[in-house]
Image: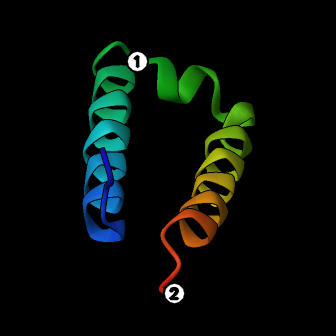
Amino acid sequence: MKLKKRTFDFIFIVVSTAILLTLSAYGLLEKYMAFALIPILIAYQLGQYSERKFKNK
């Protein structure tokens, strides 16, 4: 199954939003604010992967 870059980005945004809303609902965002850099680094690495994987040839 080949995903287009836009589809990959949309899926990532939806999943990230769902995770953040869930964490916010349980009050875990305030508690673990020190670990906020980890999801940003994961998003950066996924962006790099998608750029290499879905690069126009």
Labels 1 and 2: the sequence-earlier one: 1
Which kind of residue does numbered mark 1 sit on? Gly
Q: Is residue 14 left or right of residue 52?
A: left
Closest to the observer, 57 or 52: 57
How crowded pointer 1 is (Cα within 10 Å; few <14, some 14-19, many 20+) is rated as: few
Closest to the observer, 17 or 12: 12
Residue under circle 2? 57
Which kind of residue does numbered mark 2 sit on? Lys
**Residue drawn 51% across the image and 87% down it:** 57
Q: Are marks 1 and 2 in contact (CB under 8 Å)?
A: no
Count of marks placed on residues: 2
User: Which percent across, then down, holds residue 26?
Assistant: 34, 12
Residue under circle 1? 27
Determine which of the numbered discs, if any, sits on residue 18 in the image. Answer: none
- Outermost residue toward the top in this view: 26
**Residue drawn 30% across the image and 22% down it:** 22
How crowded pointer 2 is (Cα within 10 Å; few <14, some 14-19, many 20+) is rated as: few
User: Which percent across, then down, holds residue 43?
Assistant: 58, 52
**Relative to 8, is 19 above or below?**
above
**Relative to 21, is 13 above or below?**
below
Helix, strand or loop for disc 1? loop
Helix, strand or loop for disc 2? loop
**Relative to 26, is 43 above or below?**
below
